[in-house]
Image (cartoon, rainbow, N blue to C red):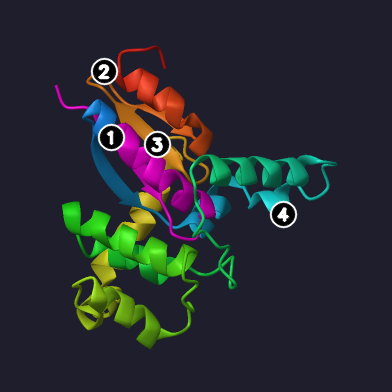
C-alpha cells in the first residue's frame, strides 16, 4: 500500500526550507512518496485571517523571542550552516509558485531544491531575473520557458485553486503536511511535527 506525504508548500516560508531536508530523511526511512502542492501563502493568510508570526504575535510578550529560540535550535539540530534569512524577506513568491506548477513529479522536486538553495542559502535577489534564470539554467531548466508559463491563465488559476482547496482542507500556514498511509490523510502542521509524521507512517497513532 502506497504511503504519501503531501507538502503544502510556498518558497516564501523559511520553515518550508527548514522542513524540506529532514522530511526527505523521513521519506527515505519510511518508503513514503512525496507530493508537493504549490500554494500562495499570502492568499492563504487572506483567506484564513492568519499572518506571519512576527506580525501576528508581536504584542504577545515573549512569544516572538521564543519562536526565534526554537528556530535556532532546529537549525543547529539539523546542521543548517548554509541557511540565511533572505534579505528581501518577506518577498512575493507568486512567480516561483507558478513555476512549480509548470513542472510535475521529480522535476517539481528538483525545482524546489534549486530555488531553496538560491533563495535561502545564496540570497539571490527576487527582483533579478537574470540571477534567478542563471540558477535555473544551471540546474538544467529552460528559464525563459518557465517564466513564460507563469503567465499562462491556466497556471495562474491553478495556484488560486490550490490555495483555496488547501484552506478548505484546514491548512492555514506553511509547512502543512497531509500524511496518508492508506487510511485517508491526516493533517500535521509545523516542522516540529516531522517526528510524529514518521511515527505515524511506521504504524503509530496520529
Task: Name the quadrant containing residue 180.
Answer: top left
Q: Image quadrant for the C terminus?
A: top left
The residue depicted at 23 percent of the width and 31 percent of the height is 32
The residue depicted at 33 percent of the width and 33 percent of the height is 26
The residue depicted at 51 percent of the width and 69 percent of the height is 92
- C-alpha span from label 2 to label 3: 15 Å
- Which residue is labeled 3 in the image? 177
- C-alpha span from label 3 to label 4: 23 Å
- C-alpha span from label 4 to label 2: 37 Å
Classify mark 2: helix, strand or loop.
Answer: loop
What mark, if any, has residue 183 been given in the picture? 2
Residue 85 percent across, percent down from the top left = 58, 63
> Magenta segment range?
1-26
Mark 1 and mark 3 residues within 8 Å of each other at the beta carbon = no
Indicate which label's residue lies in the foreground, 1 or 4: 1
The mark that comes first in sequence, 1 or 2, is: 1
- C-alpha span from label 1 to label 2: 18 Å
Indicate which label's residue lies in the foreground, 1 or 3: 1
Q: Is residue 157 visible?
A: no
Residue 150 percent across, percent down from the top left = 30, 73
The residue depicted at 38 percent of the width and 19 percent of the height is 199
- C-alpha span from label 1 to label 3: 13 Å
The answer to whether 193 is drawn above or below residue 75 in the figure is above
Indicate which label's residue lies in the foreground, 1 or 2: 1
- Which residue is labeled 1 in the image? 27
Amino acid at each position: 500500500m502506497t504511503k504519501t506525504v503531501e507538502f503544502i508548500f510556498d518558497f516564501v516560508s523559511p520553515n518550508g526550507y527548514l522542513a524540506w531536508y529532514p522530511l526527505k530523511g523521513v521519506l527515505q526511512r519510511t518508503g513514503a512518496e512525496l507530493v508537493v502542492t504549490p500554494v500562495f501563502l499570502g492568499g492563504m493568510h487572506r483567506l484564513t485571517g492568519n499572518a506571519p508570526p512576527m506580525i501576528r504575535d508581536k504584542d504577545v510578550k515573549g512569544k516572538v523571542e521564543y519562536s526565534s529560540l526554537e528556530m535556532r535550535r532546529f537549525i543547529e539540530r539539523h546542521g543548517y550552516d548554509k541557511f540565511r534569512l533572505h534579505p528581501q524577506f518577506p518577498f512575493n513568491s507568486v512567480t516561483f509558485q507558478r513555476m512549480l506548477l509548470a513542472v510535475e513529479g521529480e522535476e517539481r522536486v528538483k525545482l524546489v531544491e534549486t530555488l531553496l538553495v538560491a533563495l535561502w542559502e545564496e540570497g539571490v535577489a527576487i527582483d533579478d531575473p537574470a540571477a534567478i534564470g542563471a540558477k535555473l539554467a544551471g540546474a538544467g531548466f529552460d528559464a525563459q520557458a518557465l517564466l513564460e508559463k507563469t503567465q499562462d491563465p491556466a497556471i495562474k488559476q491553478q495556484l488560486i485553486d490550490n490555495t483555496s482547496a488547501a484552506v478548505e482542507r484546514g491548512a492555514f500556514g506553511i509547512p502543512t503536511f497531509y500524511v496518508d498511509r492508506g487510511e485517508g490523510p491526516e493533517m500535521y502542521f509545523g516542522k516540529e511535527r516531522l517526528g510524529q509524521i514518521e511515527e505515524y507512517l511506521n504504524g503509530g497513532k496520529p
